[in-house]
Amino acid sequence: MTIPYTPLPSFPVLKDQARRLRASLQAEGQPVSHCRALELIAHQHGFRDWNTLHARLGNRPRLSPYTIGARVAGCYLGQRFSGEVLSAGVFESDPTRIRLTLKFDTPVDVVTFDSFSAFRHRVNCVVDDTGRSREKTSNGRPQVELAW
């Protein structure tokens, strides 16, 4: 059994996860401090503690606009992929959003049913400067999550 790769969220997303966890536990009568919530989020993402996760995120380069021919990897609709950027551009109104056309090395099955499959070899998407799309799947995960 392979464990699916999940790119690490950005600091704001992780802190929001900690806030929501803390509120949820508070509502269930199990209050925790903000520090404890951050530690629990770090454990959830496979890190020993918040400081280790913070160091890992602080050492990764900021996502920059991709160029044609760049190699990318990540998850599309929850499925791991690697591929190439066929086109890239930013929105004049919001330069933090990047429009990409990606060509996958191996087609990705976008259907989760066992009875049939639908493979995508090329997709158009828009990601922000964290490498994630605003659009989400039914389980709340971004449709596109790029790793770098």
Image: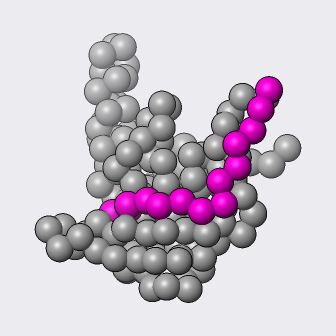
Q: Is 31 contained in the magenta span?
A: no
Q: Is residue 47 above or below residue 90?
A: above
Please provide percent x and percent y for residue 115: 80, 26
Please provide percent x and percent y for residue 86: 53, 77
Q: What residue is shown at x 60% (from left), y 46% (from top)?
A: 78
Please provide percent x and percent y for residue 69: 56, 85
User: Is residue 42 rendered to the left or right of residue 97?
Assistant: right
Q: Is residue 35 above or below residue 55?
A: above
User: Is residue 128 rendered to the left or right of residue 9?
Assistant: left
Q: What residue is shown at x 61% (from left), y 69% (from top)?
A: 103
- Say whether residue 46 is visible: no
User: Is residue 55 rendered to the left or right of residue 107?
Assistant: left
Q: Residue furthest right?
A: 1
**109 vs 42, nearest the viewer:** 109
- Say whether residue 144 is visible: yes
Asked which quadrant contains residue 110, the reply is top right
Q: Is 124 contained in the magenta span?
A: yes
Magenta span covers which residues? 115-129
Q: What residue is shown at x 37% (from left), y 23% (from top)?
A: 25
Classified by dominant secondary structure, the portion drawn in magenta counts as strand
Placement of the N terminus among the 4 image quadrants:
top right
Q: What residue is shown at x 66% (from left), y 66% (from top)?
A: 104
Please provide percent x and percent y for residue 140: 44, 35
Asked which quadrant contains residue 123, the reply is bottom right
